[in-house]
Image: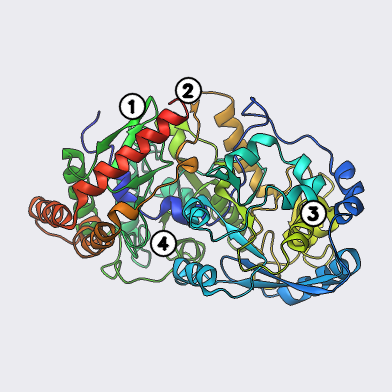
Amino acid sequence: MKKGMTGFISALSAVVLFTGALTGCGSSADKAADSSAAPTTSVTAATSTAAASQNGIDTSKEVELQFYMLGNAPRDLEIIQTKVNELARKDLNCTVKFNYTTWSDTNTKYNLLLSSGQPIDLMFTADWMNYNQYAKKGAFKPLDEVVPKAAPDLWKWIPENYWNGCKVEGKIYTIPATWKEYVPGVIVYREDLRKKYGTPEIKDITSLEAYLEAIKKNEPNMIPTEELVADWGIGGPGFTAWGPIFEQTHTSNFGATVPYGLYNDYKNPSQLIDYWGSEEFVNDMKTLRRWQEKGFWSKSALSTKEYPADEFENGKIACVMASNPGKYATTLSKVRTNHPDWEVGYLSAPEVAGYVEPVHPIHNGFAVPKSSENPERAVAFYSKMVLDKTYNYLTEYGIEGKNYKITEDGHYEMIGDTTTNGFAREAMNGWAWRNPEIQLFDKSFDAVLDIFKKYEAGNGIVIGENLFGGFVEDYAPYQAERTALYQVQSQYLVPLMGGFVADVDKGAATFREKAKGAGLEKIQAEFTKQWQAYCKSIGK
């Protein structure tokens, strides 16, 4: 294993997979035994049975469904909601209120919503929002009987092993998305500036560093890369990170998650390795210290609230590390509209590491919280969102002729720009109800589809199986230690990862000492025990 490379990305982009995940993803499960298959039931056939989906449920009383999604509401949400309610009142004798958490303190708000007991009928779920843990704690209603009754068309349309991939302790608690996609880390940068200053094509750490140095030297009004460490180490089992983008021999089955400083190799997934205790960890912290000293990010990095993609699109930073293919497409679309003279480049982790995993079935979904007063109506409505083209296009793309148009070659095209259009593509963050049979893509997204095709064509890239998505961690045995470890990470590890500790060797030793005092060894031992039992149960 190359020294200083394996863990580098766990330091380099501690927000990459999380931020990238927020751009949304579909299911990765395969149809039957074929992991490359997608659902094949036609939308026409599915929607023709829509009336049948109401036969087993009582729609005599009009109800208002409470629907909760992550993020910020689009400007034209009320207009779209009115249109949806015209349809839903006619079809299901219901209306729906679309609610958003906003991106600020999302995890805290999400937990409060599910624990408050307030009536909620549909709630976004994801592996990166701790679906397994919430399901295990009883936050959601089981759907094994509700979906076949209230939405038999949807039940049949989603492949059986997608449903199986959503099970927690034998029960289904969420409706999975069915679009197969990949969300590895992606670096997005100004290719026009790279060419302008004559730095090498970005393929590794050395070429990336050369590019950032050129930006620092020649673009005094730009920050070379995003302020990396805001909120690092807080609120999760470990760090979300790039994984092995610059490491040719090591790849992680945790989808670039490093829980409690542990990682694994896809060739031997059950065996966990201690990154925090390794030489790589110290070397990576030294790399970050060097980068911080060179001024690659601001001294206010620990407190910034700026969103990197926005800063990139506004010309304030020259490189975004917190990205994925979908986010790259969104950025590319905005840049082409607002800065047609720019050229955007990217580097994705699998092209360097030689390994990629599709997302797990639980990566995006919708559940019925236990507080729901209308579970059957909620599921029937959600089926419309997925399978009925009118509902789907309205909530994914807006009003045709006002918000978007379909080009002659079948692409989505925004009307106006991001400042004038109140409902951009997927403005509702409707990642979970994407329908792969009727989905519209902006022409800029062809670049992402080309990335996916590149992965699936081989080219030295191994497509692995996403194992971590199905793992349910039980942290009850080390809850107190886990809480204490978060405090240690915030106080001692975050400054290290931001490059703000002058004596890295001493800083790393202090962090390790404090982490050990907080109970890291107990956490790692119990987590390893659970992980290996899970791997054994699935034959890995």
Image quarter where the C terminus lies is top left
Residue type beneath disc 3: Ala
How far apart are the alpha carbons under marks 2 and 4? Answer: 32 Å
Quadrant housing residue 414: bottom right
Q: Which residue is mark 1?
A: 249
Q: How many marks?
A: 4
Instruction: Between label 3 and label 1, give the one nearer the viewer.
Output: 3
| Secondary structure category for the residue under label 3 | helix
Q: Estimate how packed mark 2 is, as few (under 14), some (14 to 19) or many (20 or more) residues with alpha carbons within 10 Å.
A: some
Q: Which residue is mark 3?
A: 150
Instruction: Between label 2 and label 4, give the one nearer the viewer.
Output: 2
Residue type beneath disc 1: Thr
Percent of width and height locating residue 110: 51, 67
How far apart are the alpha carbons under marks 2 and 1? Answer: 12 Å
Quadrant housing residue 293: bottom left
- Answer with mark 3 or mark 1, whichever residue precedes in sequence: 3
- The answer to whether residue 321 of the structure is visible from this angle is no
Q: Please report contact status of discs 3 and 2: CB closer than 8 Å, yes or no.
A: no
Q: Estimate how packed mark 3 is, as few (under 14), some (14 to 19) or many (20 or more) residues with alpha carbons within 10 Å.
A: many
How far apart are the alpha carbons under marks 3 and 4? Answer: 49 Å
Percent of width and height locating residue 258: 33, 45
| Secondary structure category for the residue under label 4 | loop
Q: Estimate how packed mark 4 is, as few (under 14), some (14 to 19) or many (20 or more) residues with alpha carbons within 10 Å.
A: many
On residue 317, which mark appears?
A: 4
Instruction: Between label 1 and label 4, give the one nearer the viewer.
Output: 1
Residue type beneath disc 2: Gly
- Answer with mark 3 or mark 2, whichever residue precedes in sequence: 3
| Secondary structure category for the residue under label 1 | loop
